[in-house]
Structure formats: C-alpha cells, structure tokens
Image (cartoon, rainbow, N blue to C red):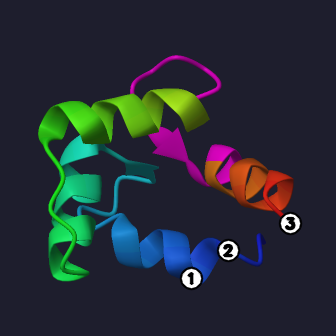
Amino acid sequence: MSEYAATFDLVDSDDDGLISAQELVRLMDVMGRQITPEAASAAIAKIDADGDGKISLEEFSAYLDSTR
C-alpha cells in the first residue's frame, strides 16, 4: 500500500478510487484556497498519466514521489 493512501482517501470523497476535478475544487475550498473547475482540471491533467481525467492512487503517489 502506498504511503500516500490515507491522504488520497481523504481527497477521494466519493470513494471511487479516483480524484476528480470536483473533489480537488472541494479540497482547495476546505483549505481556504479557491480554484475554478478549469484550474482544477488543468492541475489534474498534469498528474493524470493515463488520460482518463482523474487521478488514481498510483498517479498521486508517483507525482508526490517526483516532488521529493
């Protein structure tokens, strides 16, 4: 299991195993940082390796590992 799974699960509010742009907008709102759905989609696209428009745990983990 990824060391990032617990964090991923907090963001994946619908428990479908993927982070959508809508979930990212909601997370940022909770954190006090408003972003538009378009900005969330652009951020997702930078991490989304398979092009499905959402972030999987594997993509999330790979991204965070690359920022270390």
Can you identify the residue that label 2 sits on?
4
* Quadrant the C terminus occupies: bottom right
Above or below for 57 versus 40: below
- Label 2 crowding class (10 Å Cα cut-off): few <14, some 14-19, many 20+? some
Task: List x then y, in percent, for residue 44.
Answer: 43, 37
* Residue type, label 2: Tyr
Does the magenta run of residues contain 52?
yes
* Tags 3 and 2 touching, CB below 8 Å: no
| Residue at 77% over, 70% down | 2
* Quadrant the N terminus occupies: bottom right
Q: Secondary structure at mark 1?
A: helix
Report whether 39 appears left or right of 61.
Answer: left
- Label 3 crowding class (10 Å Cα cut-off): few <14, some 14-19, many 20+? few
Which range of residues does the magenta coloring cover?
48-59
Task: List x then y, in percent, for residue 48.
Answer: 55, 30
| Residue at 15% over, 39% down | 37
Can you identify the residue that label 1 sits on?
6
* Tags 1 and 2 touching, CB below 8 Å: yes
Can you identify the residue that label 3 sits on?
68
* Residue type, label 3: Arg
Q: Which mark is residue 62?
A: none
